[in-house]
Structures are given as structure tokens and as C-alpha cells.
Image: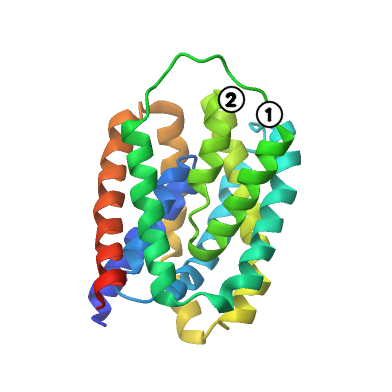
Amino acid sequence: MNFDHFSWLAGVAALLVGLAKGGMPAIGMVAVPLLSLSMSPVQAAVLLLPIYVISDMVGVWLYRRAYSAVNLRILIPAGVTGVVVGWLTAAMVSDRAITLLIGLMGIGFCLNMWLRKNGNAPPQPAHVGKGWFWGMVSGFTSFISHAGAPPFQVYMLPQKLPKAEFAGTSTILFAVINAAKIVPYQNLRPYSTEMLWSAAAVVPFALIGTVAGAYATRRIADVWFYRLVQAGLFAVSVKLVADATMGH
């Protein structure tokens, strides 16, 4: 692996993680696929967890007054349950299968965003059954690839919450889910000193991204920004699917 190339990818991935924690959850999905271009997706997920945890601390502080308590009461236990399911099934799934799954999730998320019709349906209330289902899926996909945002959004977007409340709910939920992943990750793929140093080196990128994400969420119209991010996610996801199906 070319160190300079890896360092650049890791820095960009950490910046994307920070933006996600600052209130733009879909952006964080790009981080693992991006790093998976230069290492296994499992290694990428393990490397990024410390970045997520540190960014979570900043994100929770930024959104400490803006969140949906009724949704968090449903989603937090469901999300942690999803993490446990991911932990129990991790040994049964190969790196290639995970690479394929991450790529397909990214493609599916983009196609869903691009093809769905934006109706004027009234806001939907929080729902225990739907919340538990999508919360568990979020915890599971977050465990295997830090890609819990799409299931979370499937459940939350129909509620049409204020932007800051939506972002705060996402940030707090995934802070709890990421904390729940620390012991399982250490159990499955113990951290080496080299990996921890690699994570520490890109922490500043994540912190900058977190503050920038919060700024953008509050002040900038994000429609074109999301379209560019989705295009990047789609391209990386197609590359991952090709790698998984044709071999490296």
C-alpha cells in the first residue's frame, strides 16, 4: 500500500466522518467504501471507529439541545440490539461478501434517493414497530460498515422533523451505537499500535469536519451538496461491487 495514497484516503474519510457527525449523516457512508479501495472493508471499519467515537463527543455537544426524545427512546435499544446481531454473525461473513454488501447498499441508497417521488404526504409520527425494525437494521449495518444512515433515514425522513432536530437525533443515536461497537470490534479485530497511530493522525480532519458539518447544516442549502456526495458514493460503490464480483 502506498503510504501517501493511504494517508490521503484516510484524511478524506475522517473529514467525511466529521461532516456526518456535524449533522449530515449520509455523507459518512462514503468513508468505509473510500478506505476499502486500499484495504479490506473490515480493516477500514475498525480503523474508523476511534474517529467516529471522538467525533461523536463533539457532535453530541453541538446538538445537546436539538433532538427527538421519543425517537431516541425507540431507536437506541433497537440500534444496540442490531450491533449485537452484527457481532454474533460477523464470523460467518467473508470480506468479499461484506465488500459486495457495502457496494450494494451504497448503490441502493443512491437509486432510492434519485428515483423516489417527493410527495406532499403529511408528517408521520414516531412508530415503535417501524422504529425497532429500522433501528436494528441501522445498528447492524453500522456495525459491519458504519453505514447505518440509510435505514435511519428511511424511518426518520417521513416524520419531516426540523433539520436540527433530525441531525441531533442522528448524532446522539449513532454516538450510542458506536460506543456499543468498541468491545465487539476489539474482540473481532484487536487494535494494533500502528492502527491506533493511523487513527490518531487523522483525528484533526474529523474534528474540522464535525464543526464544518454543523455549520453547513444550519446555514447552507444542502440539495446540491448531497447530490455531489451521492454521485461520489455511487461511483465508489460500483467499484466495490466490481471488485467483489470479479476479484481484485
Left or right, 152 with reference to 43:
right
Question: Which secondary structure, mark 2?
Answer: helix
Q: Which of marks 1 and 2 precedes in the sequence? A: 1
Q: Is residue 193 above or below residue 97?
A: below
Question: Which secondary structure, mark 1?
Answer: loop
> Disc 1 residue type?
Ala
Left or right, 38 with reference to 191:
left
Left or right, 113 with reference to 75:
left
Q: What's the mark number on residue 159?
A: 2
> Disc 2 residue type?
Gln
Q: Are marks 2 and 1 in contact (CB under 8 Å)?
A: yes
- Give the residue at x 50% y 72%: 46
- Give the residue at x 73% y 36%: 128
Q: Is residue 164 visible?
A: yes
Q: Residue 180 at x, y = what percent?
A: 68, 62
Q: Which of the 4 quarters of the picture holds residue 83?
A: bottom right
Q: Residue 20 at x, y = what percent?
A: 46, 47
In depth, the one of 22 and 77 nearer the eye is 77
Q: Residue 234 at x, y = what percent?
A: 28, 50
Q: CA distance from mark 2 to mark 1?
A: 7 Å
Q: Is residue 185 above or below residue 29?
A: below
Q: Is residue 161 visible?
A: no
- Label 1 sits on residue: 126
Question: Circle 2: is it few (<14), some (14-19), or many (20+) Cα within 10 Å?
Answer: some
Question: Circle 1: is it few (<14), some (14-19), or many (20+) Cα within 10 Å?
Answer: some
